[in-house]
Image (spheres, helix red, strand yellow):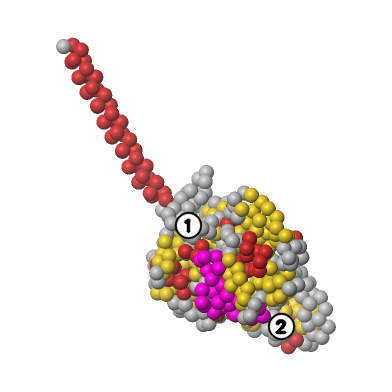
Amino acid sequence: MAKTTYGFIRIGLTRTIIISLLIIFFSFYCYSSLTLASESDSLLEVNGEEVINIEGEDFTVNYLKVPLDGSYNFETSLAGDTIGRADDLSSLAETKDNSVAAINGTYFDAYTEKDDERFPYGNLMIDGEAIFTTGEGATAGFVDNLEPVITRADVTPYIELEDDRERRVLVNHPTKQESTLVLYTHHFTRNIIERPGLKLQIKDDTVTDIIDRSYTGEDTSIPDGGNLLYLGTGYYGAEDLFSGMGFDIRYEVHDKDQGEKYCSKEKGLTNMVGAGPKLVTNGQVDVDIEGDMAGNYDTHTERSSRSFIGYDQDKTHIIMGTVNLATQYESAEIANKLGLHEAMSLDGGASSGLYHDGDYLTSPGRKISNALVVTKSPSSENSNDESEMDGVDTGEAIEDEASEDFDADVAESANVISMIIGEKELTLKKDDVEETKDLDVSPVIKEGRTLVPLRGFFEAIDAEVDYLEETREIVIDDSNTLIKMTLDDNIALVDDVEIKMDTSPDVIEGRAMLPLRFVSEKLGYSVEWIEENNEIVIQGY
């Protein structure tokens, strides 16, 4: 009997202990959950894969969702801190202190042969200083690095000299118009301006030297720590007018969508990237490629890799992301379905890239000129976290059916093809096995574009290729995308849609040669040009 009583007591105590422990555990769990939930409001959130259906096709976006609560700043970054150069997106991110994420910025001249002339095509501003200006266009900027402004804007810098005249200028934007005033700053790549016309060297906000090269076009340097103002040939003989004058510069940004005005001396934007076209306005899809002066119309209406940035109606979050093989119209629908109230496109194609926590979510196919970087605010209460990127919202891209096997981080893709201009050899790495194949003809550069032999390259990526001699037609089929091209014709058919190419297929040494980047990107692959050794790298196939 005593044993039975003891057994009941023991069982009762055990139950009591277990119940007590469960109560303590669940109380702690609920408290922790509430605490973590409140802390996560100031962290980049984590989402799973977001699949968005547009007219019967599924797209999945790589994106980051950044809270606008003061925990993060948004900063424009330049390759080498200069206008005209290019570098890896990761390098552009890591040049900023406390960087946590980055996305590619505006368009630039990616195909020039001169390393110091990869000039951007959109407005850029860093810490309230106009770095490059073009005038009108879709623009993403931040007031005090926090309040977002995404709009169609007219960006106008003005210089003020002590002759009581205010003059509109471009900043670091070379032009052949000798009547256009251009201000060159320390961000300009080259320190020499080889153009005829009157130039003012400015230091400590004062005109220190006047150079008149109206007819000779001799070199003129940008003074260390100063600026050079190009006045053109219209001021010939006016040297004495500007000597010793004080100098100032300001800018105005006119918000053409909302009617706002931002001025450097009042309410101004601190960091800004201009690209376009605009995608969403006031919560509605709003794409006007020609009106936004976003460049070649065909490049926006054909499917390619896209990057975008936008914010929600209450301005609580910024979303910046990438999607593969979409038109700008499809990209706009995606941004709209993500709940963005205002959104615009950034540079796309091989420039499209998204970087976070030391890794690529979307790896660019080339070095880029500029980027928008998310940095941890020094005043953030979470700035001492061991991992600054805990809680990053990374909706990963499956993209669409034509590239659903495309790895979110192609930089680590197991499948890589590399070729070198002028060499009849192809290196193929697949499933960690590397082999070398001979080519009948080496890759060449024509009109600034790389051409590769039809058989050697496209057969290496397991695409079916065919050449119809009677019609001179080339057919490429990888079971997802069908591409038809004709020799000496710059119009291609991609899934029966006509697309204009930058260069046409050609015959070299009796072999059909095709534009590598055009075909690769249409098949959903990433192409990188490594200039140091004239190497082409294709990833993600």
Does the magenta portion include 493?
yes
Dividing the picture into quarters, in which one does residue 537 lie? bottom right
* Residue identified by numbered label 1: 396
In the picture, the quarter occupied by the C terminus is bottom right
Q: Please state the extent of the stretch shown in magenta in the rendering.
A: 477-500
In the picture, residue 503 is in which quadrant?
bottom right
The x and y percentages for residue 232 are 73, 84
As drawn, is 309 to the left or to the right of 169?
left
Residue at the image point whose x is 73% and y is 69% from the top: 444
Q: Earlier in the sequence, mark 2 or mark 1?
A: 2
Of residue 253 and residue 511, the one placed in the foreground of this image is 511
Residue flagged by tag 2: what amino acid is it?
Lys
The circle on residue 335 is: none
| Residue 383 within the magenta-colored segment of the rendering | no
At x 35%, y 46%, the residue is 34
Q: Amino acid at mark 1?
A: Glu
The secondary element bearing badge 2 is classed as: loop
**Of 530 and 439, the residue lying toward us:** 439
Q: Position of residue 287 (x, y in %)?
A: 47, 77
- Whether residue 7 is visible to the viewer of this picture, yes or no, is yes
Task: Please name the residue that numbered disc 2 is placed on.
Answer: 176
